[in-house]
Image (cartoon, rainbow, N blue to C red):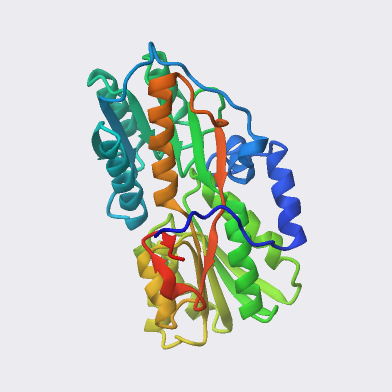
Amino acid sequence: MRRTIRKGAVIAAAVSALLLSACSGGTAEESPSTSAEETSSSATAEESESTESAPAETGEAGGLIAVITPSHSNVFFKAEADAAVAAAEALGYEAQSDSHDDDPNKQSELIDSAISNGAVAIVLDNAGADVTVGAVQKAKDAGIPVFLIDREINETGVAAAQIVANNSQGAGLVGESFAAAMEGEGEYIELLGRETDTNAAVRSDAYHAVIDQYAPMTMVAQETANWDQQEAFTKVQTLLQANPNVKGIIAGNDTMALGAVAAVDAAGLTGKVIVAGFDGSPDAVQAIKDGKMLATGLQPAVQIAELAVEQADSFIRTGETGQPEKQSIDCVLIDATNADRYTTFALED
């Protein structure tokens, strides 16, 4: 059985301070968006205000739930989309899954299509914290509640729910593991995600809340690779040539971390350069088993997608979700000690 992931490990005091700061209302991109996204990534369900948009009327389960995510070529987004569709169908709904490919215009078109097709709810992993606000408002105005997963928007009271992984907590765990493996010293590289994604900044801030406590650890390069494996591979190849004493690479997601793993391998440095990532993707966990990656922070993508559909069902039937708008689900560190218990974006007991 899949274990519900709700309790995170205790992380360094600096990360706790970061969480408190984020909860107070700061903005940054995991916060690829700015304030609201960073705030929500670190906020707990109890700290979030409950706001919900009411549909035209409530009633029986049934009808179309539109599931819109980034590209399914990324295993994380495919896993959440598949989980949302399966949960919707199990509850008696029709479900349609589409990808906006991180294009706000395409996202707007898909939301327009969901409205015209009479969708009863939309489950959305959005294309940008700021640019998505208007599209979600448009659906709300049409009487269609939107349930955001994975990424937040920089506005509250528009979506019926915003359910995200606790990126700050999870990245703090990865940062601790990375610093320990580096023995608190040496040169390292950081790969950042897409600037428009709130998660990029939240994860980076949490990494540094831990790593910056170790003065002998020196960041010699910080580059964005836009969540892309090939871009990460190319950049890390160049960076390793320019910085031959690099001891570690920490990436904002597993896709970039795997690009770094390939570049490290091509340079003949496997086992000499530590690589850590975030997401908990199957390929990253396999790299951990193979001794090519140190660790990853597991985002419970399947659980989050299922929660969104369950709350959509509740909202459709009763007019409320029974939960706060902002909801944060803790991550789990995956490393060599528990990789054998991993299943797709979850851990087995």
Viewer-proximal residue among 202 and 241: 202
**Vertical relation: 16 (above or below) 108:** below
In the image, taking residue 159 as reference, residue 77 lies left or right, namely left
Residue 9 spot, x, y in % from top left? 64, 62
Residue 74 spot, x, y in % from top left? 32, 55
Residue 182 spot, x, y in % from top left? 63, 80
**Which residue is situated farthest in the top direction here?**
56
Viewer-proximal residue among 157 and 221: 157
In the image, taking residue 312 as reference, residue 21 lies left or right, namely right
- Hey, which quadrant is residue 89 in on the image? top left
**Vertical relation: 159 (above or below) 70:** above
Q: Is residue 259 in view? A: no
Q: Residue at x 35, y 29 (%)?
A: 122
Residue 253 spot, x, y in % from top left? 46, 60
In the image, taking residue 44 as reference, residue 110 lies left or right, namely left
Tell me the quadrant of the picture where the N terminus can be found.
bottom left
Q: Residue at x 44, y 40 (%)?
A: 307
Label count reads 0
Viewer-proximal residue among 37 and 46: 46
Q: Residue at x 50, y 40 (%)?
A: 163
Q: Residue at x 48, y 87 (%)?
A: 271
Q: Is residue 5 in view? A: yes
**Vertical relation: 188 (above or below) 190:** below
